[in-house]
Image (spheres, rainbow, N blue to C red):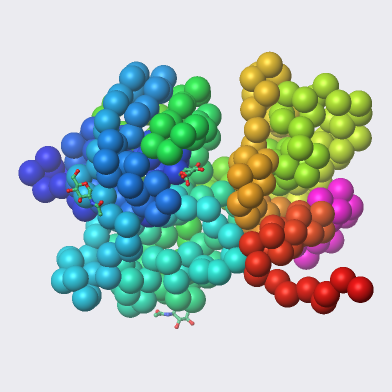
Amino acid sequence: MTNAHKKTVLVIGGGAVGAVAVLNLQVGGLADVTIVLRSNFSAVNATGYDFESGDHGSVTGFKPSVIRNTIPDIIKESIPSYDYILLSTKNIPDVPPTVIDLVSPALPSENTHTTLVLLQNGLNIEKPFLNSHPTTPVLSGVSLIGSAELTPGQIVQDEPDKLFIGAFSNPNLSEPATQDRAREFVAMYSAAGKTQCVYSPNVLHDRWKKLVYNACLNPICAITGLDTGRIRLADEAIEGLVKPAMREIVAAAKAAAGVDLDDGIVQWTVDMDPLESYLKPSMQQDLEKGNFIEFENLLGEPLREGRKVGVFMPTLQVLYQLAKAVQWRNMERKGMVDIPKKK
Ligand SMILES: *[C@@H]1O[C@H](CO)[C@@H](O)[C@H](O)[C@H]1NC(C)=O
Ligand SMILES: *[C@@H]1O[C@H](CO)[C@@H](O)[C@H](O)[C@H]1NC(C)=O
Ligand SMILES: CC(=O)N[C@H]1CO[C@H](CO)[C@@H](O)[C@@H]1O
């Protein structure tokens, strides 16, 4: 890969994670980036993104090379296949459209050229693509990022951006070839020299590790309405609820995926954010905005994987059913379910 030949990258999803990715890729100079935005298209198209980040300092009015409000239809628009498509939207399989429907205009099902990078959380997110796009290399991006979006187009990043990239296994593709794509992506993403992006072949380890937070604290904060600081102050919430849930994930990781998370992971994850930051995990933020929550991949999949191999997961089972009910409440509020009239 040389500077003379930039890779083309399509970024779908312009929230905090997508925006930081665009900034890294473009500043690195090895990529020509097109971003697809929905709700924030007008704001970003007019004035660009403003960043306040540990990695990049203060950046104002940053604009990706191309900003669009629709997914490119590469056949109808005669656009050459992108080298990479980076998906950084929420992944909510229980609410249409699916991520496959979303990405398909830019990614024909028989694709072999484009590498798909899933910058999304949770487990088994690559599985649907094995059916719909069996010969597309799919990479995993686990972002341990401390950023939150305030107003449209304004990103505040309070922790360094750390991204772990690896290849999901695919029986139809050679492993060395997909690993090469992962390494190439890491080089391109790291070229700006401002961010920690590492090649991390043990995708399952990275994903289960993040689930200790995402399957436990994330839904618990969302359901109780307490942020990660207040949940630690609240009576017995950590000992009686958060830690039991986390221990179930640690057991499931080992039994279902052979992933060894060390003993300290539970306390480490509880203490990860400084208490006084009173940070709200993503599901809590989503609920407060009236948005759907990503509970199926973050909570449902690890629960199903664990139970399949006989792990007793009573805490996660209850959290899952509560999250499902909360999702239904959102669907009713958005007019997506019909209910019988009150008598
Ligand atoms: C996006 O911004 C450009 C330049 O600022 C402007 O010419 C164009 O009309 C905008 N596009 C839309 C769809 O608003
Ligand atoms: C991909 O692999 C699966 C399982 O080995 C096989 O059934 C399928 O035909 C393959 N598809 C392609 C397009 O190679
Ligand atoms: C990812 C995302 O949608 N970010 C912001 C876009 O703009 C709306 C309001 O127009 C915000 O609520 C979102 O946080």
Q: Quadrant of the C terminus?
A: bottom right
Which is nearer the eye, 117 or 103?
103
The quarter holding residue 229 reads top right
Asked if residue 85 lies in the magenta stretch, the reply is no
Occupied quadrant, residue 105? bottom left
Q: Is residue 227 left or right of residue 173?
A: right
- Of all residues shown, which one is farthest toward the top? 276
Give the image location of residue 320, x and y in percent: 78, 55
Q: Position of residue 249 (x, y in %)?
A: 75, 46
Q: Is 11 on the left-hand or right-hand side of 96?
A: left
For the image shown, how many numbered marks are present on the structure? 0
- Residue at image x 51%, y 62%? 126
Q: Is residue 317 magenta?
A: yes
Q: Position of residue 240 (x, y in %)?
A: 91, 35
Q: How far from the left and from the top, in percent, is residue 119?
A: 46, 49
The answer to whether 222 is drawn above or below residue 304 in the figure is above
Residue at image position (39%, 66%) is: 103
Residue 205 visible in this rendered orientation of the protein: no
In this orientation, which residue lies closer to the viewer: 188 or 322?
A: 322
Q: Residue at x 13, y 42 (%)?
A: 2
Judging depth in this view, the residue of 266 and 254 nearest the camera is 266
| Chain part drawn in magenta | 304-319
